[in-house]
């Protein structure tokens, strides 16, 4: 009998073939206990976490945890309502205020996830007759936002300024245009040439949205992201971000200086038609965001970790996603899914967790072992990780055994 699940058969077959080789399912790992931002118990074993987005290690920050506990006691476990009805508590307002202060911008709107922030903002500001010009390697939430709003999608080659300019020049001059970029691209950990891209976008009369999910708290003098680092933050119309990475909880947001921004609260469906974040979540987010404003020491240590891991992995002979470390993400390129899964499992057996990433999440059909560093990784842990990569590389056949 055929049914609507037939289209998944190739994926079901591929998955079954992979698991029949006896490899642990890389997409079904359980964290049995989480001891700190960098250590968890998986399969009963102490495991160093090298595949989280906990860049600044805020998940166990005592002030953050206390703020969440207090809000849980004071306001209960959830709001049970939309932001535009009964779901705006003092904590949601305080969280938006923390974001305005963090980015030094006029407006901040908090969503229930970063995915919804992209979905909501993109679909609401760019409709059927508008054009969205976006990097072809954009995150799924960006593509889904384009689809939800029915805009005309014009992709351009990853990080290619000339390609962007060429696409912009071909569009009708009077049409509404939104250029969507990311500060850090999370698969390879590379950053965008925002300075040049913003210049060509503005010259073409386009608005610019930058997703800074993977740079917040870490890149830029105040941790505002790649746009800050490259000196173009004032030319960006909308910054999208998430609480699920450096902030250490869950939620998403958009900040902007657009004078009419607040109207979005009434017309943005993924903001209106869903329940707001629990009070404990916005309390932890606000506390974390305010602490991230003063995180320069942690940022410096995170850069050290990123450089050491990048250099060490390269020396071991692994092929990496970038020539130089550009962010807290170091991607190790695997020859294929089978080798990738074997290496992933060998690392787990050594006691290191990384993300195994595969198409459609990855560009150019690549299988990647994505390592993401945390400011709380000690220098000793980074050395330990390198030793484990060497042993796992030999055990899985990814490195020569001589
Ligand atoms: N944008 C980018 C670039 C992301 O990588 C992610 C999540 N990986 C999101 C948005 C969505 O964030 P969230 O987890 O808050 O939904």
Image (cartoon, helix red, strand yellow):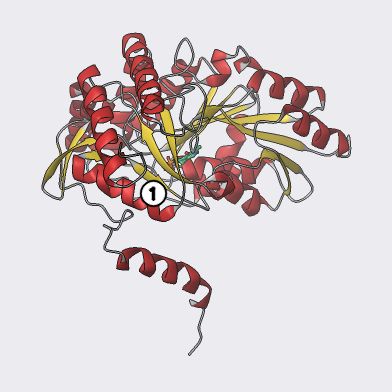
**Which one is in front, 108 or 114?**
114
Question: Left of 235 or right of it: where is 252?
Answer: left
Residue visible at 12% across and 44% down? Answer: 45
Percent of width and height locating residue 198:
70, 22
Residue lying at the far bottom in this picture: please name it. Answer: 1
Percent of width and height locating residue 32:
15, 48
Q: How many marks?
A: 1
Question: Left of 349 or right of it: where is 337?
Answer: right
In the rendered image, is residue 77 in sight? no
* Quarter where residue 334 is shown: top left
Residue lying at the far left in this picture: please name it. Answer: 44
Question: Left of 50 or right of it: where is 199?
Answer: right
Quadrant (top left/top right/bottom left/bottom right) for the C terminus: top left
Question: Left of 368 or right of it: where is 227?
Answer: right
**Which one is in front, 79 or 363?**
363
Residue visible at 47% across and 9% down? Answer: 221
* Quarter where residue 181 is shown: top right
Q: Residues within 10 Å of mark 1 (few under 14, many from 20)?
A: many
**Which residue position holds label 1?**
340
Residue visible at 29% across and 30% down? Answer: 283
Percent of width and height locating residue 13:
43, 71
**Which one is in front, 67 or 31?**
31
- Up the image or down, 129 lies above or below 34; here it is below
């Amino acid at each position: 009998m055929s049914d609507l699940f037939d289209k998944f058969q190739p994926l079901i077959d591929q998955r079954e073939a992979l698991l029949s080789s006896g490899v642990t399912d890389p997409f079904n790992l359980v964290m049995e206990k989480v001891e700190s931002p960098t250590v968890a118990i998986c399969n009963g074993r102490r495991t160093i976490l090298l595949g989280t987005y906990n860049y600044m290690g805020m998940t166990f920050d005592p002030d953050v945890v206390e703020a969440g506990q207090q809000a849980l006691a004071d306001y209960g476990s959830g709001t049970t309502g939309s932001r535009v009805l009964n779901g705006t508590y003092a904590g949601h307002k305080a969280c938006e205020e923390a974001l305005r202060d963090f980015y030094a911008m006029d407006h901040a709107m908090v969503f229930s996830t970063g995915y919804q922030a992209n979905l909501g903002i993109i679909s609401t500001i760019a409709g059927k007759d508008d054009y969205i010009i976006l990097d072809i390697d954009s995150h799924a939430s960006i593509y889904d936002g384009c689809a939800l709003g029915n805009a005309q999608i014009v992709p351009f080659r990853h990080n290619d300024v000339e390609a962007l300019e060429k696409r912009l020049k071909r569009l009708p001059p009077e049409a509404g245009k939104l250029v969507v970029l990311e500060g850090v691209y999370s698969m390879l950990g590379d950053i965008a040439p925002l300075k040049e891209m913003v210049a060509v976008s503005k010259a073409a009369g386009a608005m610019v949205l930058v997703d800074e999910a993977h740079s917040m708290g870490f890149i830029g003098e105040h941790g505002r992201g790649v746009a800050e680092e490259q000196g173009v933050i004032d030319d960006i119309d909308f910054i999208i971000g998430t609480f699920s990475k450096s902030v250490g909880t869950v939620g998403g947001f958009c900040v902007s200086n657009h004078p009419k921004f607040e109207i979005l609260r009434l017309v943005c469906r993924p903001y209106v038609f869903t329940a707001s974040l629990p009070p404990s979540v916005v309390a932890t987010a606000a506390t974390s965001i305010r602490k991230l404003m003063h995180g320069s020491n942690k940022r410096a240590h995170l850069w050290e970790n990123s450089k050491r891991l990048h250099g060490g992995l390269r020396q071991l002979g692994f092929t990496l996603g970038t020539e130089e470390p550009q962010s807290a993400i170091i991607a190790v390129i695997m020859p294929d899914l089978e080798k990738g899964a074997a290496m992933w499992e060998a690392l787990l057996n050594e006691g290191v967790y990384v993300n195994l990433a595969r198409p459609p999440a990855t560009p150019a059909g690549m299988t990647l072992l994505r390592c993401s560093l945390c400011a709380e990784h000690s220098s000793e842990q980074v050395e330990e990780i390198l030793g484990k990569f060497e042993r796992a590389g030999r055990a899985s056949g990814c490195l020569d055994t001589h």
